Amino acid sequence: MLHACRPIVCLLAVLLIVYGLPTAAAAQEGSGLNRPTIAASIAAAADWASTYHSLKHYRVRETNPLLRPLDHSPGSLVAVGALMDAGAFSAWNLTIGRKNERLAAAGLWAMTAFRSYLVIHNLRTQRRAARREPPAASHWP
């Protein structure tokens, strides 16, 4: 039982560390970007968690062309995608956030809304896949 939970705990720890970096970058400036950055990070983490679950337990594919080659390894896909997000959030906060804080906050809220939509989309995709076939332990070798 503990062995089955270990990958999930490791994944959550990696996501927590990776998504803490952009928040730290925003906090160093003492700006009002903390809340939008945290919200965008939480939405991105929820998106990656639902993507991992979909890829691991259902016959679905990643549609992002940059991440599609990692489709066979959901853990690697999530790790690479999370690193890309951390870099994007940090770059956004350090470039746009320094010049125009209101624009940067609006962009982060837009990212939050889009990632929330992706979570809902992933859950709907899981439901459709479950109707086609029952979930399996894993479809990848």
Image: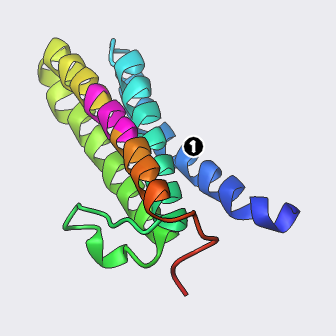
| Label 1 environment density (alpha carbons within 10 Å; few <14, some 14–19, many ≥20) | some
36 w.r.t. 47: above or below: above
Q: Identify the residue position indicated by label 1 in the image.
A: 16
Residue lying farthest right? 1
Nearest the eye: 97 or 12: 12
* Horizontal arrangement in the rendering, residue 139 relative to residue 110 (left or right): right
At 39% from the left edge and 43% from the top edge, which residue is drawn?
Answer: 124
Residue at 36 percent of width and 75 percent of height: 70
Q: In which quarter of the image is the C terminus?
A: bottom right
Q: Where is residue 132 in the image (x, y as percent from the top left)?
A: 43, 62
Residue 79, x across and y down, in percent:
46, 62
Q: Which of 131 and 56 is in front in this view?
A: 131
Mark 1 falls on what kind of element? helix
Q: Going 82% across and 68% down the picture, which residue do you hit?
A: 3
The N terminus: image quadrant = bottom right
Q: Is residue 59 left or right of residue 13?
A: left
Query: Is residue 118 inside the magenta stretch?
Result: yes
Q: Percent position (x, y) of residue 62?
A: 31, 64
Residue 124 shown left or right of residue 10 in the figure: left
Q: How many labels does the image show?
A: 1
Snapshot quadrant of residue 66: bottom left
Q: Which residue is drawn at 30% across and 39% down?
A: 89
Q: Which residue lies furthest to the bottom in this view?
A: 141
Residue 25 counted in the magenta span: no
| Three-letter amino acid code at the position of disc 1 | Leu
**Magenta residues?**
113-120
Q: Which colour scheme is used?
A: rainbow
Please state which of residues 126 and 41 is positioned toward the viewer in this rendering.
Answer: 126
Magenta region, main secondary structure = helix
